[in-house]
Image: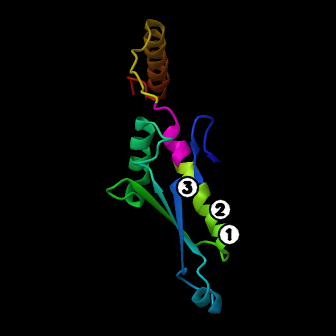
Amino acid sequence: MIRVTNRIHLDECEIEENFVRASGPGGQNVNKISSAVQLRFNAAASPNLSDPVRERLIRLAGRRATREGVIVIIAQRFRTQERNRADALERLVALIEEAAKPVIIRRPTKPTLGSKIRRREAKVVRGQVKALRRKPAGD
């Protein structure tokens, strides 16, 4: 079991890993070894995610999610397969943690009477400061 949050744990059998050859520079190593990891997680079918978390996760994944709700993460930053596996898993866990955060809806409030009065007084003071900068009327 992979612990994501206190309430969310993923089973290892839900995560599918495929190893492919990494692109980019790397010399002969890149041509011989399949060090890049393509991690697949079926968020739509995961029993460990609640419906709101699942919806936010697929929305947060963006282009990384397929129409069927499968999240695909490709990791090829590192030279070794193990580090790429760990990187892909960390990125998936971070994405699920972000989706699991509660959505805080901002409720608009009105300014208090005291704050309105203080604002008006500050405007009067500021206007007086600017008035003192002007040339006298007799000149």
- Which of the pair 121/25 is nearer the observer? 25
Q: Residue furthest bottom?
A: 28
Q: Is residue 50 left or right of residue 80?
A: left
Counting the numbered discs, the total is 3
Question: Mark 2 highlights which residue?
Answer: 86
Label 3, label 1: how far apart the Cα atoms are: 18 Å
Say which of 113 and 137 sits in front: 113
Q: Which residue is mark 3?
A: 13
Of residues 8 and 80, the one nearer the viewer is: 8
Q: Residue at x 39, y 42 (%)?
A: 55
> Is residue 7 found inside the magenta-colored segment of the image?
no
Under tag 2, what secondary structure?
Answer: helix
Specify start and end residues of the magenta stretch as a single range.
96-103
Residue type of the residue flagged with mark 1: Glu
Mark 1 near mark 2, Cβ–Cβ under 8 Å? yes
Foreground residue, 49 or 137? 49
Magenta-span inclusion, residue 100: yes
Q: Residue at x 63, y 35 (%)?
A: 6
